[in-house]
Image: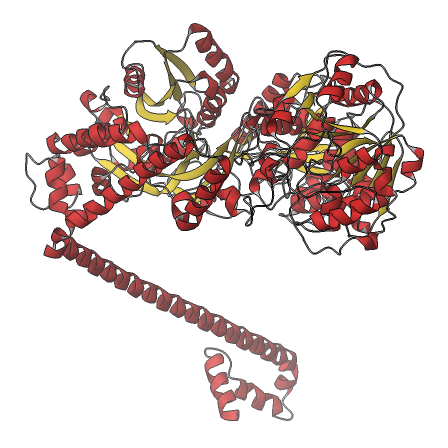
Amino acid sequence: MIPGQVDTIVRFHDIRRLPELVRCIFSLAGQTHRPSRIVLALQRLPAADVAAVEAAVAPVLGADDAPMLEVVAWNEAAPADARAALLNAGLRAVQGRYLAFLDYDDVLYPEAYELLIARLKRTGAAIAFAGLRAVRLAAYGRFSQALGEVTPPFSGRGLGDLLRHNFCPLHSYVIDRSRTDADMLSFVPDLTMEEDYDMLLRLCARAPSDFGLIGIPVGEYYYKTDGSNTVATTGGLTGEALQRYLKEIVPAIERRRRTTLVAPDVQRSLGLKDVREKRTVRQALDCLGSFGP
Amino acid sequence: MSAGKFEADAAGTQGQFPRASIDSAVREPGLGFAARAQPAVNHTLALTDEVRELRTKLRAAVDETEQTLQQRDARIRAAEALARSLELQLAARDQELRDILTSTSWRITRPLRQARRLRQRAILLCKIAAAKAYRRAPLPAAAKRRILECAFRLAAPLFRGTNTYRVWKGGGFPAHSPREVALPAEVDHSLAVPFGYRGTFDPPRLAVLCHLYHASAAQEFRGYFGNIPFPCGLFITTDTDDKKAVIAAAFKDWPGPVEIRLTPNRGRDIAAKLLGFPEVYDTYEYVLHVHAKVSGHTGVLAAWRGFLLENLLGSPDIVESVFAAFNARDDIGIIAAQHFEPLRHWINWGGNFRTAERLAGRMGIDLSEKSVLDFPSGSMFWARTAALKPLLGLGLAFESFESEQGQTDGTTAHAIERLYFHACERAGLRWIKIAHLPLFAETSAVTATMAADVARFVDRSAVRLSGSGAPLPRRAPPLPASASAVLTSRLQDRALGFGRNVKSEIRVAIGIVICGHRAAQIRRATASAARSMEMAGLSDGAQILTLNIGASRPGLRFNARMTRLPDACGLGFAAAHNRMMAEAFARGADIYLAAAADGEFHPEAIRNLVRMASAMDGCGLIDAPDFPAAPAKGYDPVTLDTPWASHSCLVIPRRVYERIGGFADAGAKRGEDIDYSSRARANGFAVRTCPTALFLRPTFEILDEPASLPVADTRADMPGKRPERGRAAGILQPIVAGARRPL
């Protein structure tokens, strides 16, 4: 585990979206925190596309102190929707003490990691969360245009809210790996939605978390007008995706709440006075009622 | 008053020589001591007065400070009280909500809420099913349209957000459906341009008649006129002296004759083009009618102007094809663009038939409201002047047109727009339409590979509106369509200069004003500039100029391409750029690029900026948007015009500098770029954004924090790097939430 280093896992699956990936990598190259490393997990791209990706991002990482780049070409046949598998593949390649994620079509402000890691150091938490600005983005052939800030569908203030629903997108947090167990940092391959939330539930139920920067946006979460990143929380799912979300994902997440135990320290941080050894996330939420921290 | 003064004296001279004693000593006659002591006494008195005055001021200051502190304390107490009150209210609300959620009634009504959610899902599924059923229903188009209109009226909330609803809401479906008279799709053919062959012809005597009511579009039109591959006369009309000045500036160095004339603001572009330069029709054989059309009333028509210009003169090849057609058949009178797809369902007489009928009657044309109609929608076209003679012979004057009241239909101008093809036929000539196929999702077009193909097209496929050969009108309009995505891309590519090579001989100078910036920031800015220049192939002529106007000088190493101008502590930001600009252009730079010292260029940024500047022929300012926090300032996604160009990363071509100089040197720290943009626009230059050029800027100002707070890992943690001052994290000034770069 390299001290001080932040490893960012970026997943990418569609070569037609290469300009967006380059934009994302540019925002990582512009981070004020160093040392930094990018683990780029590619989903079943042919060798020529992998080379094209490497060639496209290389100029952005041309500065002397630019982040290092590790390309992980993931080529397994299953599962078809490999978003969780890509994250797991990226996890196997991380080296640094700090771990972060960023999807290829989103961006972080230059100071994001500097701020989040400062919070981790200051609070001793295993994971620190910050806010994001939700921005509507018109996608054209050669560029994207920000159309305006929108009210994000994700909202919350602290751990209690996170245990109730997912309001922390993938790039809104940094994890201190020295304060987590390896089994916390894995993604369930069968989950094709909310795979990150499932991981957060396991991690935040057992390790201390910090929400001190939740009101400070450290990046942007884009809602593209072409609908290419519609997620469940936007209410934008329709048809089969909606059916799958309701029939498979929601029950799976609820199962996770009912089987994941909340550590005593975390129970205390939730404000529960009657701390018990074997209390699940669901039981903790029931104790908190609807308006806990 | 005396008592007050005494009290003041008694208090104010405490510990000093009492003034009363001195006065009595001085007044004692015959005392040599007193006489000798007089100067000292006077001095003491003066000092005493001064001390008293200072004490009074001090007391006043202390009183004022105490008062301020008291007020502040009061405000703090009030704020604390308010906070407590709000906390109590919040707790009360939380309790209320808890009570509600744990109440029996809430539990009892749970099925109702579930039912509501189910209802929402059911509505969603119904919408999907209804849309499928509508598409598959075997009904005539007119009946489907009526069903759709009913649905929109009865259940508007269900349809908001759909394109068809927006078109309908924007007046797309006429309230009272006019008679269908447009050409049926099966006979509405065009000639594909450019042709598959190069025609041979002598340079035509061509006059471009252009009405620029929107003078800001002058640069855009100048770009399109550049596609005319032979000399032509340029005749431009507008309606005010200010606009005339802007247009004159935009065409100042146009390689050919340009005449600009003021016309009354009546009859829109139609009157201006027909009546603005009447002598042109006697001296030129061909005319091009164009105008700065702005169709802001419906979003789907936003790209209409670009569509027409791309079809009619989008490239030299297209213009050559037009004249190859005129040359192939001397009976072709008008060549217009095929209709813009989103507009097709509006091709009808609207409320203009009666006016058109009167005008047509004066031309000897017998119009029927039931006969087929076609016209150059948008009133832009190529023509032989002979084809317009019947219209010109009407003896119209500007007074023949209605005064401008923002009409969208029913004017003489709208009627004449619908009579161009009739007039052409009246002149004994034919009319045809052309289509640049990449701009159409679907259209029927014939490709000409030789002159005989053009002749064959006219004989077989060109329509006549009059006579026995006229086709029957269509029975139902097509459903509203969106503009093709290719069109938007094409217009964006044109504005971006995409596909152009950046000439390596272009010399770019980057100017960076340093004012309290850290050395690391400046190193990143200059290194990224050098990399971006290299990527653009512009390294040979590149210069990076810096000018420090701050009190301290950051330690920087300079290489051969970097020039540090002498420090000018206290010089304004604008003046500093002006100094570097003058230096850069004196050294032969073609482009000056003002860049913020805390920014970082994307490797492709300078290539994209220079390419766009080349596409604009150096006739405008271009800024690069701040990244990643999206800037508040917007821009037109098609033309890339922006209200003002930010000096955070701003391209200033030599041509602009030579015309308007540098920033206004008023010493103001902010607003000089807005002022500069206004001056540029007033001088006929465009002001645009290059969205493909990203310029990374900090989003927060991270302030110094007390040493007791833990410090973040920064670049200073890297081996061999010294920590830099002011980079401790924890205390933030979020710019993004402030005035600088919010959306």
Position of residue A169 measured from the top left corner of the image (x, y, whole percent): 33, 33
Position of residue B125 measured from the top left corner of the image (x, y, whole percent): 30, 36
- Residue lying farthest front? B468
In the displayed structure, does residue A19 sit left or right of residue B563?
Answer: left
Instruction: Indicate whether B402 appears above or below A224.
Output: below
Position of residue B737 measured from the top left corner of the image (x, y, whole percent): 45, 46
At 51% across and 76% down in the image, what residue appears? Answer: B56
* Frontmost residue, B111 versus B332: B332
* Frontmost residue, B187 versus A142: B187
- Residue lying farthest top? A47
* Frontmost residue, B146 versus B107: B146
At 79% across and 38% down in the image, what residue appears? Answer: B210
Q: Quadrant of residue B637?
A: top right
Q: Quadrant of residue B370?
A: top right
Q: Quadrant of residue B222?
A: top right
Position of residue A92 measured from the top left corner of the image (x, y, whole percent): 28, 14
Instruction: Indicate whether B642 appears above or below B66.
Output: above
Residue B481 seen in the current view: yes
In the displayed structure, does residue B710 sit left or right of residue B598?
Answer: left
At 64% across and 86% down in the image, what residue appears? Answer: B32
* Frontmost residue, B617 versus B734: B617
Q: How many marks?
A: 0
Residue B654 seen in the current view: no
The N terminus of chain A: image quadrant = top left
Instruction: Indicate whether A69 appears above or below A163.
Output: above
In the displayed structure, does residue B649 sit left or right of residue B713?
Answer: right
At 89% across and 37% down in the image, what residue appears? Answer: B281
Q: How is the image coloured?
A: secondary structure
